[in-house]
Amino acid sequence: MERTRCITCGSYIEVGRGATEFACPDCGKTIGRCSRCRSQGVTYRCECGFLGP
Ligand SMILES: [Zn+2]
Ligand SMILES: [Zn+2]
């Protein structure tokens, strides 16, 4: 089973505990965000170059 890492801080996320994962609107790659980075509103960047809020 594959685990998703937060794209900002690199820690493993657990979906349903404030963390989220979704497909990059640009390239479709799975992007994970942990609860901490979400609450801080940290900007993320996909490896395709997409920049998200
Ligand atoms: Zn994070
Ligand atoms: Zn992307």
Image (cartoon, grey):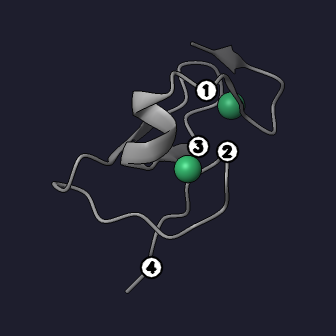
Residue drawn where x is 63% and y is 19% of the image: 26
Who is closer to the viewer here, 16 or 47? Answer: 16
Determine whether 19 is above or below 46 in the image. Answer: below
**Type of the residue with mark 4:** Glu
- The answer to whether the residue labelled 1 contacts the one labelled 3, judged by CB atoms less than 8 Å apart, is no
Question: Label 2: which residue?
Answer: 8
Residue 3's disc is: none
Question: Label 1: which residue?
Answer: 42
Q: Quadrant of the N terminus?
A: bottom left
Residue drawn where x is 64% and y is 48% of the image: 7
State which quadrant residue 24 falls in: top right
Q: Earlier in the sequence, mark 3 or mark 4?
A: 4
Residue 29's disc is: 3
The answer for how far apart the CA atoms under marks 2 and 1 are is: 8 Å
Residue 2's disc is: 4
**Cβ of mark 2 under 8 A from ligand 1:** yes
